[in-house]
Amino acid sequence: MGKYIPLHLITEILSKLPVKSLLKFRCVSKSWLSVIWSPQFIKAHLKDHASEDNQRLLILGNFGSFKHCSLKSLMYGEPSPRLITLDIPIPLADERSGRGASSTEHISWYGPVRIVGCCDGLICISVTRASQSDFILWNPSIRKYKKLPNLGLPSTASLNRVWGFGYDSFSDDYKAVILVKQCSINGEGLRVETRVYSRKSEAWRRIADFPSTPRYTSPSSGVLVNGKLHFLAHKKVRGRIIVSLDLATETYGEMEEPNHYESDVCVTLSEIEGILLYFINPFPGPFARGGDLWVMKEYGGSWTKVLTFQHEPSGPCCPKLLSVSAEGELLMRECVGIELYSSGEGKSFRLLKEIYNVLDAYCFTESLVLPSTHDSNCNDNMKPIKF
């Protein structure tokens, strides 16, 4: 029997391996390296590994620290899941004073580092600095990133900004979306500009203005379902609505919220297994009451309330629903940490107790997806970005 193994068999075997192993095998030969970084292989590998068992929970803590752990081990009984610290490719020093990120005057709820969104292993992050805001596409699994072109937004704009990140299957492109509130020059009041970054063109474009006023909650990220980013917004006259942005056509749509709620509640949108969820919680306080979970089982159809629960948020931010177990347990991001709510017991349990002050959290899948369409345009995570 000959020693030669056909390349198509090698490719098939490699596609079954995790990202960590593939990074080691890049050094075997030039042909293996070429296979691993080919667009066809990257897509096939993503498809084979995009299951719940391979998902991880990405946590952005205070002072811009990133950690991640296995989502499966977190939700299904492992008492102390292994937390891994990620080397963030961003220098978090205060440029004015030369001090590190421990300077509390440089840290706020809105900065300096926030997650814009996660999709197919790519993470879009925003860095708010003394004079401006910058955006970065980052794949921590392969330790590559790309700093996006400067939008020219002042750092104060982060207080009036909503964003999103997702995949446009029609053009096979990843897009970042930024909604920025601007004062109208002609005196007609406020408008909300929409800027879109395309990974293919590697440039920002301005599209039609956002048709409503987005709700500036935390988190303020659009939720990707059915190729559209969904944002909580205010109606022009009175009331609230959900506005969608189709990433393929770059046009807007609207859908009603599932029910009318008073203003003393906080609402977040989530996506789990391609389904849009509407998660409502009372603001903390003596008059806090139970929350509701609504789902849109068929996109564009009606809302269905699947759960009512008694849960009081543990801080000033709106709880964010991250995942739902087969037993109906809710994994939530709270201001003070990650919690698991048991609908059967009506209680919340604190997980990952070593983590405090969680700014944001996302579920993501490890992948080979590049921050740029060409590997040569990406930077290695070993070197920090220069601003």
Image (cartoon, helix red, strand yellow):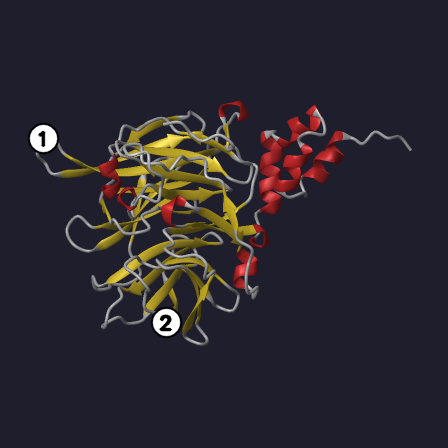
Q: Is residue 169 visible?
A: no
Q: Are marks 1 and 2 in contact (CB under 8 Å)?
A: no
What residue type is disc 1 on? Asn
Name the residue nearer the viewer: 137 or 308: 137
Q: Is residue 238 visible?
A: yes
Q: Which residue is mark 2?
A: 309
Instruction: Pick whichever of labels 1 and 2 is earlier in the sequence.
Output: 1
What residue type is disc 2 on? Phe
Side of 287 where 382 appears, left or right: right
Counting from the top left corner in percent of width and height, residue 135 is at: 37, 34
Image quarter (top left, top right, bottom left or bottom right) of the C terminus: top left
Q: Quadrant of residue 167?
A: top left
Q: Quadrant of residue 346?
A: bottom left
Q: Which residue is mark 1?
A: 186
Find the distance from the CA under tag 1 to the CA under tag 2: 48 Å
Side of 93 where 130 appears, left or right: left
Counting from the top left corner in percent of width and height, residue 69 is at: 53, 53
Q: Residue at x 28, y 39 (%)?
A: 179
Q: Quadrant of residue 313?
A: bottom left
Counting from the top left corner in percent of width and height, residue 230 is at: 34, 47
Side of 181 where 318 appears, left or right: right
Task: Tell me the SS state at disc 1.
Answer: loop
